[in-house]
Image: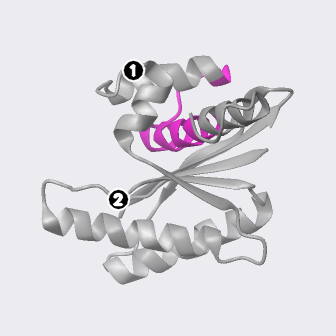
Amino acid sequence: MRVLGIDPGSRATGFGLVDLVEGRPRAVEWGVIRLTAPEPATRLLELYRALRERALGWQPDLFACESVFVHRSAASALILGHARGVALCAVLGGERPPVLHEYSPTLVRKTLTGDGAADKSRLRRMVVLELGLDAPPALDASDALALALCCVHRETRATRFVALGLGGRP
């Protein structure tokens, strides 16, 4: 199973690719796409091209992205929504699109740390520990890896529930 996590942003978008190997998650690639164009529309095109190229090369089975949430500022929420929409189109627009899973930031934090209110540094420490990384990734990349790990945990747990005859989602 290959899972792509994306943490979209209008200036920086984190990505993290995780494979499930022999029942354990393994980080394959991660990083941050820095968008440099001065105009917002051109930055969105930059984001689309960068994610589209990567998604076609990686061919993930699952795609984990943050669900839509209410932001303090309507303008910020709109800008973030544009970046999220571009990420969805770039990753899901291929001939064999991955299955989309959307998670709230609270659910991701609760799944990985046990505390839905954990801060970003605590979440990053858990990502480093769980994936056995030598150094902590940038926060945007860490958030993307956390999304991918959340997806791995929830999907493997759901599969175990079905195998035990206990139904679908836990």
The disc at residue 122 is 1
Q: Disc 2 versus disc 1: distance between alpha carbons?
A: 23 Å
- Magenta: main secondary structure equals helix
Tell which of 99 and 55 is nearer to you: 99
Q: Is residue 47 visible?
A: no
Query: Residue 104 lies in magenta, yes or no?
Result: no
Residue 114 left/right relative to 153: left
The residue depicted at 68 percent of the width and 47 percent of the height is 3
Where does the N terminus fall, quadrant-wise? top right
Quick one: label 1, few (<14), some, or many (20+) residues within 10 Å? some
Q: Which image quarter is the C terminus in?
A: top right
Mark 1 or mark 2, which is nearer the start of the sequence? 2
Would residue 31 be visible to someone looking at this image?
yes
Amino acid type, mark 2: Val
Task: Look at the numbered disc 1 and give the secondary structure of its residue.
Answer: helix
Q: What x and y, as percent, mark residue 168?
A: 64, 42
What's the magenta region?
131-152
Query: In this rendering, is residue 126 above or below 47?
Result: above
Whether 16 is drawn above or below 40: the answer is above
Residue depicted at x 78% and y 60%: 59
At x 44%, y 44%, the residue is 140
Of 76 and 20, nearer the camera is: 20
Q: Is residue 109 left or right of residue 74?
A: right
Is residue 114 placed above or below 63 in the rendered structure?
above
- Pointer 2: what residue? 68
How far from the left and from the top, in percent, is residue 122?
A: 39, 20
Contact, mark 2 vs mark 1 (Cβ under 8 Å)? no
**Neighbour class for label 2 at 10 Å: few (<14), some, many (≥20)?**
some
